Amino acid sequence: MAVLSSMAVSAAMLLSCFPGVASWENRLSQSLLENENTPTLTFSILEPGTKPSCTTKMHKQMFEALYSHPQYTPNEYIADLIFINVDTMLQIMWPYRAEIGKKEGGDFGSGVYARNYEGNCQWHMVVPTDIYEATLKNYTAQCTKCSKTQKFVYFRSPNHWDQPECEFDLPLVRNRFTNFSMIFVGEDLTDELSEGHDVNFLQPLLDEEKDEMPLPEYRAANSTRYKACFIGAQSSDIRRAMFDTLNDIDGFYVHETIKWAKDSSDYKETMRKCDFGFSPRGDAHYSFRTTELLNMGVIPVIIDDAQREPYNIPLREWALRLPEGKIHKAEHFLNKISESEKDRLRENGRQMLQMCSTPERTTYTVVQALFDSLGDSDILMKSFRLSE
């Protein structure tokens, strides 16, 4: 218990570094204190010998949170997990989407986007996995005291545009590290390509969208106008099927946009009047949309048969999953959800939002998901009102 008590002290220090995130970390620290049998796992961070050519703001914020985490140890020899401070995720779209989306003629490899990085970050010019691999090999070659059970965490890039295949293709990346005990973390992991301890996470909110989730009294004062809504582009076969099938259903609002859905003038106003919001896969198996729906008090309906459940928490505890082949049955599917079940899903949705609304909270939750998986504990699951 002495170690666990020190964790609570460290957690308090973490909270002082990140104002506004106290509630989730406090509850998580309390859960740790109440579980005496929780394994006291630790992690450390390796700094590369070669400075990466680019680092995104999201990566910097996540690693600042890692360094401040109560389970971080500067002694890499005793750590259970090793992170390497190289931005292999390259999440270019956070948190500049709103600003960049308004610019004409920009594309994902252009200077319009690259200037939002620290350094030279046009994707075709940077191969951060090379630096990650070199750092890993150098560490293991010199580390004679390291635990044989140490695992190395790799953040997989969710964005495929203009990147070398070796950066985003998960089988190719895995093949580079077959001699190491790896865990892959990302936003775009699928069940097919994931292995035991891998962790998927939800995209954090943009800066201007944080803490906008309506309180319960908001929903009471603003009666629901629609049963289910989707505002977005027809960027995948699933989305095209939605527009073909759901447009004429009474109580459904399905509206096409050419650019980002959130740029639509009525996006937030409309979505907040919906019981359910569709979150179908688009160009990839991750979306800003799911977190945005949680932030607006709307129950997400995930339409993606392959996506790995975020934080390895069963999707049924905080959202719904509609099979891709049953889009035409969406009305019947949603009509079966009772009011009490809607209330439970909204309550758990608020909890999930606490876990993913900022990069700092996301980092904290990813670490706990890894610890839960490695230690066979269920700290994250204790945060939810479980289905019967």
Image (spheres, rainbow, N blue to C red):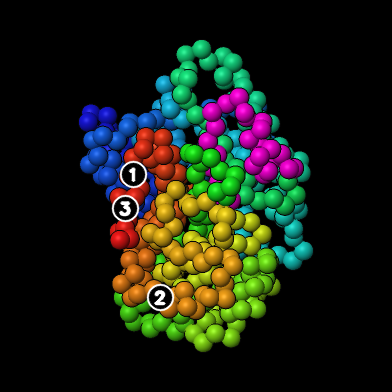
SS of the residue under disc 1: loop
Labels 2, 3: front one = 2
Q: Residues within 10 Å of mark 1 (few under 14, many from 20)?
A: some
- Amino acid residing under circle 2: Lys
Horizontal and vertical percent position of residue 372: 38, 40
Seen from the viewer's position, the closer of residues 80 and 244 is: 244
In the depicted structure, whether residue 145 falls above or below residue 230:
above
Residue under label 1:
378
Indicate the quadrant where residue 126 lies.
Answer: top right
Q: CA distance from mark 2 to mark 3?
A: 26 Å
Q: Are marks 2 and 3 in contact (CB under 8 Å)?
A: no
Q: Is residue 113 magenta?
A: no
Q: Which residue occupies 41% across, 51% down? A: 313
Q: Which residue occupies 74% across, 66% down? A: 104
Q: Is residue 53 left or right of residue 34?
A: right
Horizontal and vertical percent position of residue 381: 34, 50
Q: Quadrant of the N terminus?
A: top left
In the depicted structure, whether residue 339 falls above or below residue 197:
below
Labels 1, 3: front one = 1
Residue under label 2:
336
Residue under label 3:
383
Q: Is residue 182 magenta?
A: yes
- Amino acid residing under circle 3: Ser
Labels 1, 2: front one = 2
Q: CA distance from mark 1 to mark 2?
A: 30 Å
Seen from the viewer's position, the closer of residues 64 and 159 is: 159
In the depicted structure, whether residue 287 falls above or below residue 10:
below
Asked if one can make out residue 91 in the rendered structure from this viewpoint, the answer is no
Range of residues picked out in magenta: 164-189
Q: Residues within 10 Å of mark 2 (few under 14, many from 20)?
A: few
Horizontal and vertical percent position of residue 43: 43, 30
Q: CA distance from mark 1 to mark 3?
A: 9 Å
